[in-house]
């Protein structure tokens, strides 16, 4: 092997300093962009919860057209999938699949008669699964739209 070939081989590749610079740039990029991406994921969950509530309200409207009333609190959203006992004009199922959980994997809370008008109240308690809260733990409710 000639001396010039050995020099070329020893000079090819990256030095430790160059690797550290690249890793530092990647870490800085992740530190700046990462939190913004997580916030978008939280917003997407809120939008998904609202969309699911709208789907429930549409199915509940069909249920009421057929039966003349909304399901009771005890019957819950499950009445959109399975005929409640003693109900004659039920033409369901009104949902194509089982009643889903909210985007945080907690059950939606259904209440009829509701406290906010003539329609049922549907609530997702947000990320923490508890009533109240702020930010991503804020309750998402059917009677308000943001």
Image: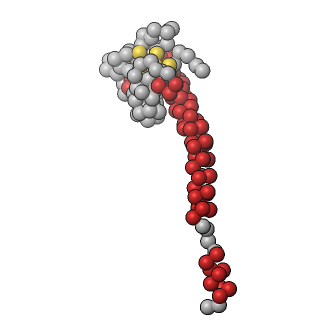
Which is more toward the observer, 34 or 6? Answer: 6
**Looking at the rendering, in which quadrant would you find the C terminus?**
top right
Q: Is residue 67 above or below residue 128?
A: above
Q: Residue furthest bottom?
A: 1
Q: Is residue 6 above or below residue 79?
A: below
- Residue visible at 66% across and 80% down? 8
- Residue visible at 52% across and 25% down? 135
Q: Residue furthest right?
A: 4
Which is more toward the observer, 92 or 141? Answer: 141
- Residue visible at 51% across and 8% down? 117
Residue 63 seen in the figure: no
Q: Is residue 107 above or below residue 35?
A: above
- How far across and how far down the image is residue 36, in percent? 59, 37
Left or right side of 96 for 9: right
Residue 113 seen in the figure: yes
**Looking at the rendering, in which quadrant would you find the N terminus?**
bottom right
Find residue 110 and report its image quarter.
top left
Left or right side of 55 for 74: left
Which is more toward the observer, 126 or 135? Answer: 135
- How far across and how far down the image is residue 97, in percent? 44, 35
- How far across and how far down the image is residue 136, in percent? 50, 27
Find residue 129 and report its image quarter.
top left
- How far across and how far down the image is residue 22, in percent? 61, 57
């Amino acid at each position: 092997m000639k001396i010039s070939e050995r020099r070329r081989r020893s000079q090819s590749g990256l030095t430790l300093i160059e690797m550290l610079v690249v890793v530092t740039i990647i870490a800085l990029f992740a530190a700046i962009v990462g939190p913004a991406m997580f916030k978008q994921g939280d917003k997407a969950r809120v939008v998904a919860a609202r969309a699911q509530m709208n789907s429930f309200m549409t199915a509940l409207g069909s249920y009421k057209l057929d039966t003349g009333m909304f399901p009771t609190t005890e019957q819950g959203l499950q009445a959109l999938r399975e005929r409640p006992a003693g109900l004659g004009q039920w033409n369901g199922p009104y949902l194509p699949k089982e009643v889903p959980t909210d985007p945080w994997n907690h059950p939606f809370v259904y209440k009829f008669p509701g406290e906010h008008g003539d329609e049922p109240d549907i609530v997702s308690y947000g990320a923490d699964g508890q009533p109240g809260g702020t930010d991503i733990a804020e309750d998402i409710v059917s009677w308000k739209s943001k």
